[in-house]
Amino acid sequence: MYPLEKLDQLVNTTTNPNACIKGEIPLKEFITALNLAAEEAENIRRYLISSIFAAKEKEGLEIFIHTCQAVCVNLINNINAAINEVPAIECNRHTSNTLKCTYSSILFHLENLLGFIERNCFDYFNSRQKLPLTLAVLAAKNFDEKLKIVSAKLLSSSHDHELINQMTAPIVNFINLSSTYIPDYHLYNYTQLYFSELETILMDNDICFCSSVVNFIIFMNVNSGDMLRFLVKKMEAAILQEDDMLEQIEEWAMRQKEIALVQEKPGAQLITGSPSLKQLLQDAIASEITLLEKKTERQKNAPLPKLPGDDTMLKTQLTVAQLAVLIRLMVDTGIIKCNNQLLFLKMVARSFQTPKKAAISADSLRTKFYTAEANAIDAIKDYLITMMNQLRQYKQ
């Protein structure tokens, strides 16, 4: 750890330009110390390389690299603060410029060292390390400028402002955080990757906006609670347009299959240690399906209210299969309106008798309702022809 300690000591004793101006440290000695600090940053880089090759324990190497990061970030912040302090000190222009140039030199070496650690020690790099303050501010400014261009293109593709806001939420989140909280390297790198991928899909002018946005959000694994709630709510609003619960179950199942086919970008994850957005969505949809199935089962087993004249059964010459086809024909053509087909079919089963069935099974009627038999269709066709002929006689 000696090089780290030496660098830390050199920088911390020279990040008070007041000491130089007041004569507590001669300018020459002050500049010499700063230059030594710059050289020491390069020594750490060499020391780091030799340590990586000499490391026998992964844990020890990881701790060392994390310490290097923390020291570099802290020193970069200290030096930037010192640079900002120089103009406020009463001194001649030569001394002021000399201090600024020397501070900038050591800053250059420290930033290079930090970049070297990130590029070459990626497996051990501490993604939870806070960014240097200057980098966080600069990144937020760049993201903000690029976001204006991206937002304009998104608005030209869709008028769904809510969807656009969700698509740009990870970028806006980084920009907003930077004003009150220093983001870490994980969020910074993720936002950079997100921006890059977003610009790529916007190059395709023929995209189906809504589906592409949802697929992109899943692809980039924006696994936040807000995003999960938004997507589930949006799917639910579309699916609830179906009145029948069985159809709603089918719609949810279809969405679940579509989501299962969406690829995820390797390594992309907004929130580390949390399940992927794809998994969260599939779990949420599975819960919705389970809930609907339970409701359907309860309605299926619920006793029907007693109807007026319930003791008098309607007798028909039709078979159960033929009755199912006729009922479905009237429902599909709008002659009969029903909000709940399960309840309706159960009422029909209880109200009719066929020549062979004194009591019709609701399950049997429902099965034949959804899967019409060919013979039953032909029989109903003959009845309809007979009914048309009967109608002609009514006109006479």
Image (cartoon, helix red, strand yellow):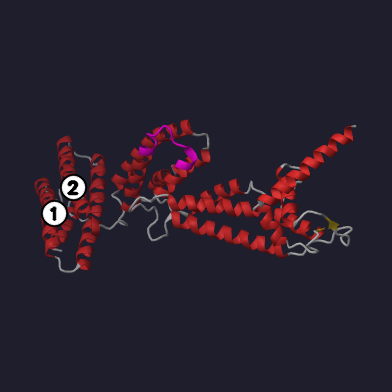
Q: How far is disc 2 from disc 1 in space, using C-alphas?
A: 9 Å
* SS state under label 2: helix
Q: Are marks 2 and 1 in contact (CB under 8 Å)?
A: yes
Residue named by callout 1: 45
Residue 112 bears which disc, if any? Answer: 2
**Residue appearing at x 50%, y 34% in the figure:** 158
- Occupied quadrant, residue 291: bottom right
Q: Which residues are magenta?
A: 199-212
Query: In the picture provided, is 326 more to the left or to the right than 1?
Result: right
Q: Position of residue 305 (x, y in %)?
A: 81, 61
> Magenta stretch containing residue 315, yes or no?
no
Res. 299 in view: no
Q: Position of residue 80 (x, y in %)?
A: 25, 46
**Quick one: label 2 or label 1, which is nearer the N terminus?**
1
- Along the viewing direction, whichever of 208 and 68 lies nearer the viewer: 208
Q: At label 2, which amino acid type do we have?
A: Asn
Q: At label 1, which amino acid type do we have?
A: Arg
**Residue appearing at x 76%, y 62% in the figure:** 360
Q: Is residue 387 above or below residue 273?
A: above
Res. 152 in view: yes
**Which residue is outermost to the bottom?**
57
**Which residue is outermost to the top?**
156
Tell me the quarter of the image containing the C terminus: top right
* SS state under label 1: helix
> Magenta stretch containing residue 211, yes or no?
yes
- Along the viewing direction, whichever of 370 and 43 lies nearer the viewer: 370
Tell me the quarter of the image containing the N terminus: bottom left
Q: Position of residue 199 (x, y in %)?
A: 36, 37
Query: In the picture provided, is 127 more to the left or to the right than 314?
Result: left
**Residue appearing at x 43%, y 42% in the figure:** 168
